[in-house]
């Protein structure tokens, strides 16, 4: 973690076919299948029934190929229209307040209440406005700048020499570690259907970001799951340097510590906290799943390690990340609880563990409407303060560390007996 390397901006925008991304942004239906409009407006009962189940493929805003039914396509069209409308709101605010109005220092809060002591009204107003805006979504073209600011990544980068990333990458060239070997193994499996990420250039960029961070923090090194997170960061941020610093602030400041270390102790803590929250916020679901013998961590571990990047559609994932970078890791609990809550009736009806997994996977894969998910997450789940979650983490951390210690003792005993 020493500040001994430098920074270099490697622009991957051209390699990622930025012109196509701009076209999708300016023309939301550009990549939709030609048959979509005919299907959408066909009013015959039989035709409408068949249309609902017709499978169509199309490319989303970030270059991922998506397969869904016509309802999914229509939802995505509506989402893209809302993206355009939200963009106009941001542009109007920039015209009124200045291009960088949201780059002002953030206001600290305690128990969800913003302190106004010695605070300029304009800063308070901007903070409240920004929080509301971000929950409604950051326009894709503004995400890099907004994320760097609200997450603290820009501030973190400013504390090191400008040559940090460049020298870090040079220092890693030709070196082989357990982390680099695992990264090389995982690269071809990281979103293999994405044209840029599956290209030689895309995989080289992703490798540099992941290897670079594994040398920056040898305690974390590399953990499976980070490849998906870093890949999506590259697609959004467009440069390796920005993606690297977003990954750094995520692991060092936003998420709970030790989530990605060898023991995954932080991840185990988060899973225990989530189980407790599920029992409090969705008691009927929690009781039913417990009676079935279903361990929710079978599903939620991947959600938390990959930050939903493998489970939710890309734009929905990024809407979650918009709020995550601004409000912190409590957002992950809100979203995970919301997914269970959205399917409460279905979950309470089933009796087989396999059906639970099928329902949750189907739900997440077809959550093309980010507003639906985030409305559940913040309006239906209710308030959860950071302090409350922190206290719960401390309680669970004691249990997790005791279990890990027991496991290490058993392994040591087995080795000695052998």
Image (cartoon, rainbow, N blue to C red):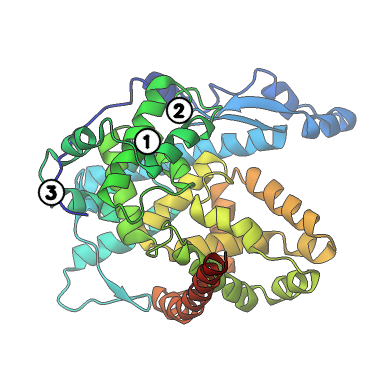
Q: Residue 146: percent from the left, percent from the top?
A: 30, 47
- Do tag 1 and tag 2 residues touch (Cβ < 8 Å)? yes
Q: Nearer the viewer, residue 38 or 107?
A: 107
Mark-to-mark CA distance, 1 and 3: 21 Å
Would you name the residue on which mark 2 appears? 197
Residue at disc 1, secondary structure: helix
Does dot 2 land on a helix, a strand or a loop? loop
- The mark found on residue 234 in the picture is 1
Q: Is residue 72 left or right of residue 273?
A: right
Seen from the viewer's position, the closer of residues 168 and 382 is 168
- 249 shown above or below 22: below
Residue at mark 3: 160
Q: Which mark is residue 208?
A: none
Which comes before the other along the chain, label 2 or label 3? 3
Asked if residue 83 shows in the view, the reply is yes
Q: Could you say where residue 231 lies in the image, as x and y percent from the top left?
A: 42, 37
Q: Residues within 10 Å of mark 2 (few under 14, many from 20)?
A: many
Name the secondary structure under disc 3: loop
- Note whether 192 is above or below 333 in the view shown: above
* Of marks 1 and 3, the one in the foreground: 3
Q: Residues within 10 Å of mark 1 (few under 14, many from 20)?
A: many
Q: Position of residue 321 (x, y in %)?
A: 43, 51
């Amino acid at each position: 973690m020493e500040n001994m390397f430098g920074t270099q901006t490697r622009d991957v925008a051209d390699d990622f076919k930025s012109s196509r991304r701009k076209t999708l942004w300016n023309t939301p239906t550009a990549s939709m299948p030609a048959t979509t409009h005919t299907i959408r407006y066909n009013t015959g009962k039989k035709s409408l029934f068949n249309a609902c189940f017709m499978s169509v493929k199309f490319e989303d805003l970030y270059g991922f190929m998506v397969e869904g039914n016509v309802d999914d396509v229509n939802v995505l069209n509506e989402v893209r229209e809302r993206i355009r409308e939200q963009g106009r709101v941001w542009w109007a605010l920039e015209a009124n307040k200045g291009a960088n109005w949201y780059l002002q220092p953030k206001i600290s809060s305690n128990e969800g209440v913003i302190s106004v002591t010695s605070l300029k009204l304009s800063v308070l107003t901007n903070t409240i406005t920004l929080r509301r805006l971000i929950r409604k979504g950051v326009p894709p073209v503004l995400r890099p700048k907004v994320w760097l600011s609200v997450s603290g990544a820009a501030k973190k980068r400013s504390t090191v020499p400008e040559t940090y990333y460049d020298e870090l990458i040079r220092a890693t060239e030709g070196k082989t570690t357990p982390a680099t070997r695992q990264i090389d193994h995982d690269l071809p499996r990281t979103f293999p259907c994405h044209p840029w990420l599956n290209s030689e250039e895309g995989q080289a960029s992703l490798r540099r970001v992941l290897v670079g961070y594994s040398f920056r923090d040898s305690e974390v090194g590399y953990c499976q799951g980070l490849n998906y997170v870093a890949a999506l960061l590259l697609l959004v941020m467009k440069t390796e340097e920005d993606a690297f610093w977003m990954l750094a602030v995520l692991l060092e400041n936003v998420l709970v510590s030790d989530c990605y270390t060898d023991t995954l102790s932080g991840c185990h803590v988060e899973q225990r906290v989530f189980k407790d929250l599920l029992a409090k916020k969705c008691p009927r679901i929690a009781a039913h799943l417990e009676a079935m013998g279903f361990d929710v961590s079978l599903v939620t571990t991947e959600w938390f390690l990959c930050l939903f990047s493998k489970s939710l559609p890309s734009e929905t994932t990024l809407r979650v990340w918009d709020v995550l970078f601004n409000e912190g890791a409590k957002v992950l609990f809100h979203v995970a609880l919301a997914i269970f809550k959205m399917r409460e009736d279905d979950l309470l009806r089933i009796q087989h563990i396999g059906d639970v997994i099928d329902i949750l996977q189907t739900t997440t894969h077809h959550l093309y409407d980010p507003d639906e998910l985030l409305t559940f997450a913040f309006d239906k789940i209710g308030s959860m303060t950071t302090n409350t979650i922190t206290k719960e983490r401390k309680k669970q951390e004691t249990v997790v560390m005791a279990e890990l210690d027991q496991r290490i003792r058993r392994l040591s005993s087995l080795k000695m007996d052998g």
